[in-house]
Amino acid sequence: MQMFDNLPWYGYVILALAITSYAYKYFNIGKKEYDKPDLEKAKFKKSSAANLGLDRLFSLALFTPISEWWGAYTNTLIFRDAKTIQPYLEGWDIDSPSGYWDLTEYFMKDGRRWYFDYIFQMIQSEPKENWDELMDQKFGTNERAQKYFDGLSSGEVLNDLKQKGVFTFDSDMELSLAGYDAAMLVGQARIAFTGNIISEEEAWKVIDFATQLALDKFSSWEDFGKSFALGFALDMKGKYDNYYQEVCHIYKQVLNDKASPWNTINWPN
């Protein structure tokens, strides 16, 4: 420290400013870099031991954007390993059979479709001055309904999906959220099976339901994917923004990469 002993008084001021500036850059700019989404390249991993038929592979592919974020295989019902997926089970309260089936029945019957269909149609058909009253009559105090309303009425979600190149036209909103609900049913069945919450037979029954939901509503991976992306944006944008940005980055690869299940498995006629 002798090198600082003979500094003039203003030298100490300059030194203090330099240290403060460095600290600001380290803690402020460094934190921003740390918090940036960890944008990864999709790998579309396959297990050499898998022997599923094309119809099963199509069904599993409905969850591809999120399963790629997890780094899961594309061709097995098993989803990573039980230890890895435990936080997901607990976060969704599906770490018990009763919890899993409660949530699954909800996604089968209503899902996020219940929120979107009403709010989107209300915005399209009702005068703006009636919106608050109609929302209160339909949903009461409901945090998710309010989040959906805010994202849809402001145009924020639509504009973000258009900027990302996911949507081309405003009319893409009319695809609704059946694709998102179907994907969630597939993913949660895979994860619950891996966690020994449900049997293999039960998992495939749920996945078969989700597959039919998707087939009844869509005629292409592109339309299904837009519906998935819309639901994911409404659920995750903002509160889970890094996760949202990461999955959107992967989604574009799932849609465009030649190795993606969405490009190697045809949508059934």
Image (cartoon, rainbow, N blue to C red):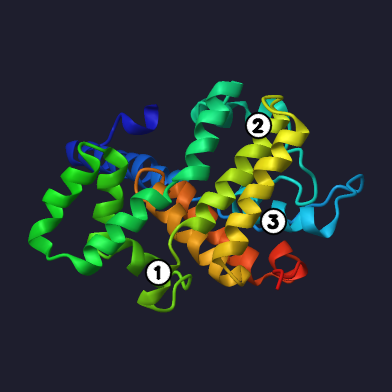
- Crowd class of label 2 (few under 14; some 14 to 19; many from 20; radius 10 Å): many
**Which residue is located at x 48 percent, y 44 percent?**
109
Q: Is residue 38 visible?
A: no
- Closer to us: 45 or 26: 45
Mark 2 or mark 3: which comes first in sequence? 3
**Residue 165, position in %: x, y?**
47, 73
Task: Point out the frontmost of discs 2 and 1.
Answer: 1
The number of numbered discs placed on residues in the rendered structure image is 3
User: Which residue, given by chain and number where applicable, does mark 3 sit on?
Assistant: 61
Mark 1 or mark 3: which comes first in sequence? 3
**Which residue is located at x 56 percent, y 55 percent?**
39
**Residue 267, position in %: x, y?**
69, 69
Question: The residue under label 3 is which amino acid type?
Answer: Ala
**Spatial CA span between label 2 and label 1:** 31 Å
- Closer to us: 60 or 5: 60
| Label number found at residue 174 | 1
Mark 2 or mark 1: which comes first in sequence? 1
